Amino acid sequence: MWRKHFWLASCLLLSSAILLATGFAYRNSGYAQYSAQRRSCCGNRGSRMNLSSLVEHGKASYYADKYHGKQTASGEIYDRNKLTAAHPTYPFGTICRITNFATGRSTIVRINDRGPFVRHRIIDISYRAAQQLGGIDAGVFDVKVEVLENRKPGYFSDLTE
């Protein structure tokens, strides 16, 4: 009889320890703050989001060459020579200004994909945008992302200048 109770107590203790540990890691990872900010500003995914005053700070990287010519989440074909980017939640067609803190240079990109899928990165940008920001050598760099315009879904303009 005591073995059954010991086993049950052990399972409960282990599961509560796991929950506490993962909750603690989540709260201290910085992702919890990002998720809370994303939920509070973006609301329901199906609705139009009001992002006009949103500014994010974090790390950016640029797409590898292997993605050139492949389809993005929006259905477009990725072109490394266009000024485009991937963000986890911004609607497709959203226009953003990206500023590299190290160089002080900025460029304007259009969101046409989802990502990045690497922890602690807030945006993936095209090769051309990384060139304009001076981030090619660094690979991963600190940026500020400012939403300039929230375009209608399905609206795609070529930012190729």
Image: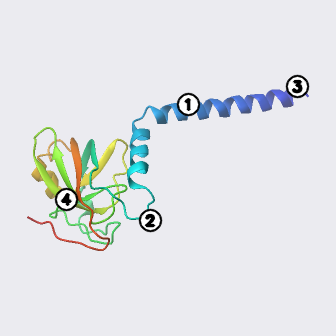
Q: Please, which residue is most extreme toward the bottom here? A: 154
Residues under numbered marks 2 and 4 in contact, where contact means CB atoms less than 8 Å apart: no
Q: Quadrant of the N terminus?
A: top right
- Which mark lies nearer to you, 4 or 1? 4
Quick check: 38 above or below 25?
A: below
Q: Earlier in the sequence, mark 3 or mark 1?
A: 3
Is 64 on the left-hand or right-hand side of 8?
left
- The three-letter code of the residue at mark 1 reads Ala
- Which mark lies nearer to you, 3 or 2? 2
Q: Position of residue 20 (x, y in %)?
A: 58, 31
Residues under numbered marks 3 and 1 in contact, where contact means CB atoms less than 8 Å apart: no
| Nearest to the observer: residue 136 or residue 124 | 124
- The residue under label 2 is 46
Quarter assignment of residue 88: bottom left
Q: At numbered mark 2, what does the secondary structure look like: helix, strand or loop?
A: loop
- Which mark lies nearer to you, 3 or 1? 1
- The three-letter code of the residue at mark 4 reads Val
Q: Position of residue 3 (x, y in %)?
A: 85, 27
Q: Residues within 10 Å of mark 1 (few under 14, many from 20)?
A: few
- The residue under label 4 is 109
Residue at 25 percent across and 66 percent down: it is 78
